[in-house]
Image (cartoon, rainbow, N blue to C red):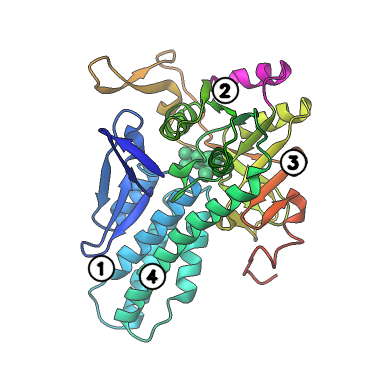
Amino acid sequence: MKVTHHGTSRHYRTVWFDAPRNRVRLIEQRLLPHQFKIVSTADYRETACAITDMVVRGAGAIGATAAYGLAQGVRAFRGRGLKALEKHTARVHRTLAEARPTAVDPLNAMRSMLAQMNGPTVAERQAQALALAEQFADDDAAHCQALGQVGESLIHDGARVLTHCNAGWLAFVDHGSATAPLYAAQANGKSFHVFCGETRPRSQGAVLTAWELAQQGIPHDIIADNAAGHLMQRGEIDLVITGSDRTLGRTGEVANKIGTYTKAVLAKRHGIPFYVAIPLSTIDWELESGAAIPIEERAEEEVLSAWGVTPSGRRQSVLVANPGSGARNPAFDVTPPELITGIITPLGCFKPRQLWKHRVKLGQTVAV
Ligand code: MRU
């Protein structure tokens, strides 16, 4: 999307590849909204660290980063023979797959690449790896743009939309999932208002979604996570749209940022439609129960502290909790299908339990 930085506007993707230098290039998301900076990773291990440390985050963005990281690792191979390349590739794949556990996009991206990297020589497989990673990134952007057109009709003129975390373009390669219908509605001249749930502990809503919407000139307010129920009760929210890190094709359960489940329960209680927007790479066709989704538990410091900038512009973390108290920090939760009005995909909006029925159309490739 367009970013205005130091007075000049330019289109950026969240992640891209510098082929001559074999580097993955990323927007350093931990510095936003206070600083806009591009960083590079020198090898696949650094790329995996960038995912773990959340330099880059969001399901589609880490999917594309893992895809580029796999290509980066394969292209760096200097050994001889396909057997040695395959052993090396398995190591690269494992490192990237373990970088963050909940989102399925990195696994889907790399699995699809490995299935198609079948050239007869090392050089051909190295070329294929990069072409396939570029294809994943392009597909991610195209899927998000297409689902924006599908979801646009849900945004009526004057709508008040609640979203959670950041499922914007920063969480994908471009356009975003939850935000894509908003950008499409804006392009069609509709006016509406967005409430960005703050999303403690890392505040992706307050920090990233609010920055994105401000960049695109969309009216919005940040609300404390605990304010959502009150606004719903007072009739100030018309619909909710969130993203997902893993949506189970068999059951329609949706893993997303911690607090999504709470908002879905509240929306049900108040009769407010609750939508989840996803590109097709976010569907997990294998797991049979949401209870089996690996939920990332992050460091307790994220709950006990908060990042901000001082009046002089220095980025700083401060302790906000009682010194010595411990914390639990599950990063995601699972929302059951009965709380979800519809799953917005590039191929249409589906009832969550109907994903399985449409699995051929939605492109599942796993044998069942
Ligand atoms: O921990 P994060 O920031 O990587 O979490 C991902 C998210 O931003 C959200 O859960 C989002 O809705 C799904 S990713 C598009």
Q: Is residue 114 visible?
A: yes
- In reply to whether residue 125 is colored magenta, the answer given is no
Helix, strand or loop at disc 1? Answer: loop
Residue that appears at 39% across and 83% down: 119
Specify start and end residues of the magenta stretch as a single range. Answer: 223-237
Residue that appears at 49% across and 26% down: 200
Residue on which disc 3 sits: 341
Residue that appears at 65% across and 56% down: 287
Cα gap from disc 3 to disc 1, whole angstroms: 46 Å
Query: Tag 1: Cα neighbours inside 10 Å, few (<14), some, or many (≥20)?
Result: some
Residue type beneath disc 1:
Ala
- Rendered position, 241 above or below 100: above
Q: Position of residue 43 (x, y in %)?
A: 26, 58
Helix, strand or loop at disc 3? Answer: loop
Residue that appears at 46% across and 55% down: 63
Query: Which of labels 3 and 1 is toward the front?
Result: 3
Residue on which disc 4 sits: 131
Among numbered discs 2 and 3, the one appearing first in the sequence: 2
Q: Position of residue 130 (x, y in %)?
A: 35, 68
Query: Tag 4: Cα neighbours inside 10 Å, few (<14), some, or many (≥20)?
Result: some
Q: From the viewer's side, name the closer residue of 5 and 116.
A: 5
Residue on which disc 2 sits: 225
